[in-house]
Amino acid sequence: QVQLVESGGGLVQPGESLRLSCVGSGSVSIFSMSALGWYRQAPGKQRELVAVITSGGTTNYADSVKGRFAISRDNARHTVFLQMNNLEFEDTAVYYCNVRWLLHNYWGQGTQVTVSS
């Protein structure tokens, strides 16, 4: 089992930045082999992929965040980051990190990001 804890969410104004972190614990031996992702779920909407980084470092982003968000990983610290710049109202959601490797699929509890003026 892998436990994931997200942090870094908060209330910001449009145009501001936040950096989310997700730290893994438990059976973290799989961390470096796993694809790490950030998802988000806004009220009344389905959970959607925001960004993913493979074990080899390849990244992929939702079109809505390309050029504004950056995902990165630190395998030694079992951590995945999401740098979010130029935040927009539409970015308001609960953000979840995800660790996926073969049949293993783990989720964090989520961190709230609210963009409001």
Image (cartoon, rainbow, N blue to C red):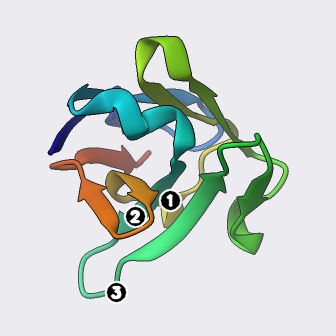
Q: Name the front one of labels 2 and 1.
A: 2
x then y, percent, for residue 54: 67, 50
Q: Give the residue type at disc 2.
A: Arg
Do the CB atoms of the residues marked 2 and 1 lie less than 8 Å apart? yes
Residue at image x 25%, y 87%?
Answer: 44
Q: Give the residue type at disc 3.
A: Gln
In the image, is residue 45 above or below residue 36? below
x then y, percent, for residue 57: 76, 40
Q: Name the front one of labels 1 and 3.
A: 3
For disc 3, the marked residue is 46
Question: Which SS class for mark 1?
Answer: helix
For disc 2, the marked residue is 40
Residue at image x 66%, y 48%?
Answer: 53
For disc 1, the marked residue is 91
- Whole-number angstrom distance, CA of label 2 to CA of label 1: 9 Å
Question: Which SS class for mark 2?
Answer: strand
- Whole-number angstrom distance, CA of label 1 to CA of label 3: 14 Å
Do the CB atoms of the residues marked 2 and 3 lie less than 8 Å apart? no
Q: Give the residue type at disc 1.
A: Asp
In the drawing, what numbered circle is on residue 61?
A: none
Question: Which SS class for mark 3?
Answer: loop
- Of all residues shown, which one is farthest toward the right? 67
In terms of image quadrants, where is residue 52? bottom right
Residue at image x 41%, y 23%?
Answer: 78
- 24 to the left or right of 86: left
